[in-house]
Amino acid sequence: MLRVVIVGRPNVGKSTLFNRLTGTRRAIVGDEPGITRDRIHGAAEWRGRELEVTDTGGIIPDDLAQIPAAIFRQAQVAVDQADAIFFLVDGRTALAAPDYQLVRLLRRSGKPAALLINKIESAAQHTDLGPYAELGIQPQFAVSAEQGIGLDDALDWLIAQEPAARNAARNLGAAESTPGADHGAAAAAVNTKTMSAGEPSTTAGAEGERIPGIAIVGRPNAGKSTLLNRLLGEERAIVSEIAGTTRDTVDALVDRAGRRYRLLDTAGIRRKGKTRLMAEKLSVVMARQHLRRSELALVMIDAGEGVVALDATIAGYASESGRSVILVVNKWDVARARGQRRAEFERELRDKLKFLAYAPVVFISAAKGEGLGALWKAVDLALAARAKRVPTAELNRFFAALDLDRAPTPRGQRLKIYYLSQVTASPPTFVLFVDHLRPLHFGLRRYLENQLRRAFGFTAAPLIFRLKLSGAKPRR
């Protein structure tokens, strides 16, 4: 797979180009400069060649502020990992000092680079491209990322770099196989890989392998990006104390103990009245979209601040979307140092999130790497439970042993259930065959859920019940 990275200063159209090449709306696009911060990966194809495209944040080399400096580091990593570079400039504005500084940085990388002059949508604009020759980057392509104009030639140039990329990969492999080479990364327990950004859900890997999506959600500064980086073993997402640092959803594949997972670090979800910038509003919308496309949600709770109303709102989003849920209490090292006791904290958490009584609670410190073994164990149990299917015959034996009279259902609302059948998994969904159709009373629903979980271990998974009118007798 040929890897290309898109770089440039803020607001030149990098995310628009990324979305155009990958055929997605994966990256947030807007007029506010500096919307993209983390590096984002996506898959594309051109003339039968598979491409991996990386979008980077707008780079201002001399800006030493915390977030711009972190964006610069992320972009450098992306350039180091790429086979070729698309250097994007804005064809509607004059060249600026950061453009010239970026040229010097790209030359030091030694990677083949093409200059893409963006926002060129008319013949008149094509005649005025002389100043861009000053940058000294060849070839140059006049393009419109928004309209898709001129990208064919740029992509043809890109795939022409493939032989050089293969030779570089062979040379690197030979160097790594020599005695004394650093094999630390190969020996690591967890290996990471960038992944396609098309549909951030359970996807098929090699030989039909199903890769589950795990969304990390929570309010700003709960430690979501720190957890992602810790699980991946690299600085994949920018971490800072500034709330709202993450805007796009950052995703990556992680290999652990022979199994692959897709991790998605989403933007911190705030109350609607607290999001002012367009980028923040869009990032919250996209966070909820990616949540719905995952199988499992890790709902991050900041132990240092305790359980607040917004935590319940975010957990509600995860529950309503049908995701399996694990409640991850982060920064437990801080709370423990203040004398907080685990049993008391969990009691408060359960009291405020009663609707998630089925969700396991895991205490961690993402910053220190504490509790990650327990978290991975909970993840595997949750994913296995979500995929569980119980045969109808086994369900009938279970149903025959139930005492439905124990369910706290008011008189006049009794529902005769003849039998039940599981129709789908992920999430586990059951059809109840009943004598008449009416909403399932909360008491009866809770009783059935508790008994099913006790009998079959549906850890972390919501259970869905549907009613179907039938006078039939139970199947054998």
Image (tube, rainbow, N blue to C red):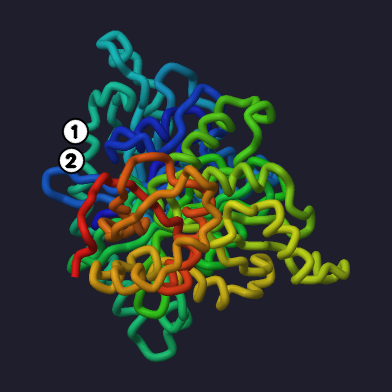
Which residue is identified by label 2? 156
The N terminus: image quadrant:
bottom left
* Amino acid at dot 2: Asp
- What's the residue at 47%, 18% (across, down)? 93
Find residue 439 and name its label: none
Q: How many marks?
A: 2
- Say if mark 1 contacts mark 2, CB within 8 Å: yes
**In this figure, which residue is indicated by the disc labeled 1?**
152
Q: Residue furthest bottom?
A: 179
Q: Position of residue 164 (x, y in %)?
A: 23, 59
Q: Quadrant of residue 206?
A: bottom left
Q: Amino acid at mark 1?
A: Asp
Q: Is residue 240 left or right of residue 168?
A: right
Label 1: how many residues lie within 10 Å, few (<14), some (14-19) or many (20+)?
some
350 left or right, relative to 396 = right
Which is more toward the observer, 228 or 382? 382
Q: Is residue 224 above or below residue 46?
A: below
What's the CA distance linking mark 1 and mark 2? 6 Å
> Where 389 falls versus 140 (above or below)?
below
Q: Is residue 143 above or below residue 115?
A: above
315 horizontally vs 64: left or right: left
Mark 2 element type: helix
Q: Quadrant of residue 152?
A: top left
Residue farthest front in this picture: 411
Q: Nearer the viewer, residue 201 or 410?
A: 410
